[in-house]
Each structure stands twice: as C-alpha cells, then as structure tokens.
Image (tube, rainbow, N blue to C red):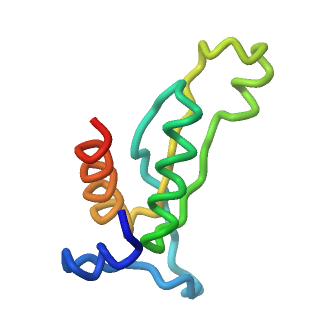
Amino acid sequence: MAPDRSRKLGWRPAWDGRVEWGRERRVVELIQTNDIVLLSALQAELAAHGVETVVLDTHTSIMEGSLGVLPRRLMVIDTDAFLARRIVAAFQEDHA
C-alpha cells in the first residue's frame, strides 16, 4: 500500500503525537501471533499511515527459548484503534 492510501480512503491518524497532560493514553491489542514476519510487516504498514505501534511479550517469548510458543501482541493507542483495524484488514486482503 502506498503511504497516500490513507488520504484516498478518508483515514487519518487520530493522534498527532502531542501529549495532553492529565489525559491517560491506553493501548489496545490489534493481533496476537507467533509470526514475527507478519508483525514486522504490519508495523511497517501502520507506520506508513502514521500509526505508532508497540509489540508486547517479545522478551517473554525470548525467555521461553524462542520456541514460538508464546504469542506476541501488536498494540496501538486506543484513539488509533479504529484506523489501525481498517489498515490491518486492508493489509490482510491485499496479502491473502
């Protein structure tokens, strides 16, 4: 997907990176997977649309011996969750 696709589809990131003091930011789980290639691709796709991500449970997975038993979670800020889910759905359709 091209970086301009978000504009064509009427999407825009809900969070511009500025911190509002006194307001909590929560993260929402997008996917849970053992596929590190998929995680990397989704992170790149979301970053291209201006959505910041964080992968949780990476160190836990490494501590268990990198056997791939424990899934890693891709998280986004709650205000970006709707946009992120649409991007992930479009990505999965394009790469199915």
* 2 vs 8: above or below: above
Q: Is residue 63 left or right of residue 80?
A: right
* Residue name at image x 23 percent, y 44 percent: 93
Q: How many marks on residues?
A: 0
x and y percentages locating residue 7 in the rendered image: 28, 82
Query: In which quarter of the view is residue 37 placed?
Result: top right
* Residue name at image x 30 percent, y 65 percent: 83
* Residue name at image x 53 percent, y 41 percent: 39
Q: Is residue 93 left or right of residue 43?
A: left
* Residue at the far left in the pictured view: 9
Quadrant of the image containing the N terminus? bottom left
Which residue is more in the foreground, 13 or 90? 90
Q: Is residue 8 left or right of residue 16?
A: left
Q: Is residue 7 left or right of residue 71?
A: left
x and y percentages locating residue 35 in the rendered image: 53, 28
Which residue is more in the foreground, 32 or 39? 39
x and y percentages locating residue 19 in the rendered image: 59, 85
Which residue is more in the foreground, 11 or 79? 11
Query: In which quarter of the view is residue 36 placed?
Result: top right
Quadrant of the image containing the C terminus? top left
x and y percentages locating residue 72 in the rendered image: 57, 32
Which residue is more in the foreground, 7 or 79? 7
